[in-house]
């Protein structure tokens, strides 16, 4: 029992997964799908009702009337005198489109598959008491009708040769689908356009200055949503700007008391314990490093992008950090970029310093193409998969041993992540060819062309 329940549950989850995968992802697609299902149900119901309550009764009555007219004409012709029969044949032809003849010809039977022909044959057979087959010639339907010991051949032009429910259904479905698509496109267009613009704005918003508010127009719900998003964006921008200003101000103001403490340390008497002086110097150096990191982050986060020559810029930045490093270029690299040069310089400096601290040297590679990436790799232990997100948190270290061995403020990678987020870049950690860490920064969207 438990096994059967597990199998049923697994099949249910599999079916739900298949349905979820097949369900359209866009608003237009889902609206079309819902309206199409509803329109299809209405069309099927209407077609079934039309067929059951209109087409079938009319077809039955029409076939019965046609069979009755044929039998009545044959019976009347037999009962008339030979002199009156020619006049009767003319009247049948002119008024009822019937041709009656005592001369029985060998004509081909009608093709199978016509439901209305089968219905006429059934009605004729019921009226004459024996099987009657329809024939076709000269554009007319012919029936051999036994009457008064003779066989009369009656030709008539059927007003309803065939009913094609498949064609009718396809026409209804095709017309309905076109109406649904046009209607849903007009409706969803008013919704999808603003929602797509809002999604793009939300995806590109980084809290920096210069945010363009979304237009507050359209249906009431979209106006409310756009207004709320604009208010949120303004609040976040103001908050981040105030935070950056406050951080820069505090860090700058801390430099003065720090300088006084250094001066006081220099003026201490010579008989003060040298180890105590060294300890104070290390603490002051750590404080100075933290303040420097905060100031550099504040300047980089608020920096505006400008047009720079890409290859000379990267080469000069790397040479300024370490003259021994050589930049490796791969692929088609664009010549000019719109970028915040100070922020990217800080990102590269932190990544190179981190690679040299935790690995044996650093290497810089720039991959060209549609999405240009700057890779900083090292030869070392690398960063485990489970830790690759957490290393971007402030003051997070992989282990205490690395902290004591390498020193540093613990803000290097955190500043890298914050600066990349502020300028729309993407930073990720992979595995280098030599087994060390490969920290790559994607600069997609910053390039002005070659």
Image: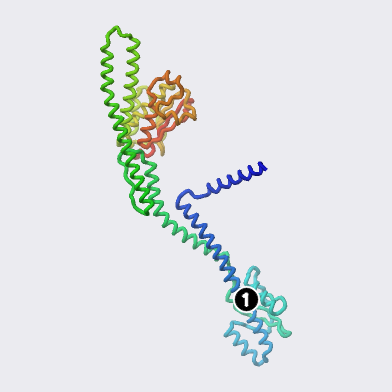
Visual colour scheme: rainbow
Residue drawn where x is 65% and y is 70% of the image: 111
Viewport quadrant of the C terminus: top left
Q: In the picture provided, is 422 more to the left or to the right than 91?
A: left
Answer left or right for 100 relative to 37: right
Q: Where in the figure is residue 328, as x and y percent of width and height? A: 40, 29
Q: Position of residue 227 (x, y in %)?
A: 34, 47
Quadrant of residue 212 within the rendered picture: top left
Query: Which residue is nearer to you in this view: 388 or 67?
Result: 388
Decide if residue 450 is in sight here. Answer: no
Task: Name the quadrant of the N terminus.
Answer: top right
- Residue position marked by numbered label 1 in the rendering: 63
Is residue 435 visible to us here? yes
Classed neighbour count for the residue bearing mark 1: other residues with Cα under 10 Å, few (<14), some (14–19), many (≥20): many
Q: Is residue 82 left or right of residue 267?
A: right
Left or right, residue 310 beside residue 154: left
Query: Toward the viewer: 369 or 14?
Result: 14
């Amino acid at each position: 029992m438990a096994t059967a329940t597990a199998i049923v549950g697994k099949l249910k989850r599999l079916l739900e997964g298949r349905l979820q995968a097949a369900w359209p992802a866009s608003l237009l697609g889902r609206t079309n799908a819902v309206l199409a299902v509803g329109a299809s149900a209405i069309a099927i119901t209407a077609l079934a009702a039309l067929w059951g309550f209109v087409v079938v009764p009319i077809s039955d009555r029409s076939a019965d009337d046609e069979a009755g007219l044929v039998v009545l004409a044959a019976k009347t012709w037999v009962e008339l005198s030979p002199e009156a029969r020619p006049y009767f044949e003319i009247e049948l032809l002119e008024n009822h489109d019937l041709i009656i003849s005592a001369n029985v010809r060998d004509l081909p039977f009608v093709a199978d598959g016509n439901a209305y022909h089968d219905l006429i044959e059934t009605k004729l057979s019921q009226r004459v008491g024996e099987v009657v087959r329809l024939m076709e010639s000269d554009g007319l339907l012919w029936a051999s009708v036994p009457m008064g010991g003779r066989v009369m051949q009656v030709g008539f032009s059927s007003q309803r040769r065939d009913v094609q429910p498949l064609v009718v259904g396809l026409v209804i479905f095709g017309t309905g689908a076109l109406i649904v698509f046009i209607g849903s496109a007009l409706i969803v267009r008013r919704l999808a356009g603003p929602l797509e613009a809002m999604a793009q704005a939300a995806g590109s918003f980084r809290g920096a200055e210069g945010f363009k508010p979304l237009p507050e127009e359209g249906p009431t719900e979209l106006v409310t949503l756009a207004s709320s998003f604009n208010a949120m964006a303004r609040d976040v921008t103001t908050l981040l700007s105030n935070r950056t200003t406050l951080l820069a101000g505090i860090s700058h103001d801390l430099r003065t008391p720090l300088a006084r403490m250094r001066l006081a340390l220099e003026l201490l008497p010579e008989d003060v314990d040298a180890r105590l002086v060294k300890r104070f110097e290390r603490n002051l150096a750590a404080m100075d490093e933290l303040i420097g990191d905060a100031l550099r982050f504040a300047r980089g986060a608020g920096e505006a992008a400008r047009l720079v020559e890409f290859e000379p810029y990267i080469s000069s930045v790397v040479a300024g950090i370490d003259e021994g490093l050589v930049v490796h270029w791969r692929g088609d690299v664009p010549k000019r970029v719109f970028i915040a040069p100070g922020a990217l310089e800080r990102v590269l400096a932190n990544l190179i310093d981190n690679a040299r601290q935790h690995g044996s040297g650093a290497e810089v590679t720039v991959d060209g193409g549609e999405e240009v990436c700057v890779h900083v790799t090292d030869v070392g232990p690398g960063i485990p998969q489970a830790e690759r997100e957490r290393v971007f948190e402030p003051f997070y270290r992989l282990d205490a041993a690395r902290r004591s061995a390498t020193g540093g403020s613990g803000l290097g990678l955190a500043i890298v992540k914050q600066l990349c987020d502020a300028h729309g870049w993407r930073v990720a950690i992979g595995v280098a060819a030599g087994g060390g860490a490969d920290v790559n920064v994607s600069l997609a969207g910053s390039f002005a062309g070659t």
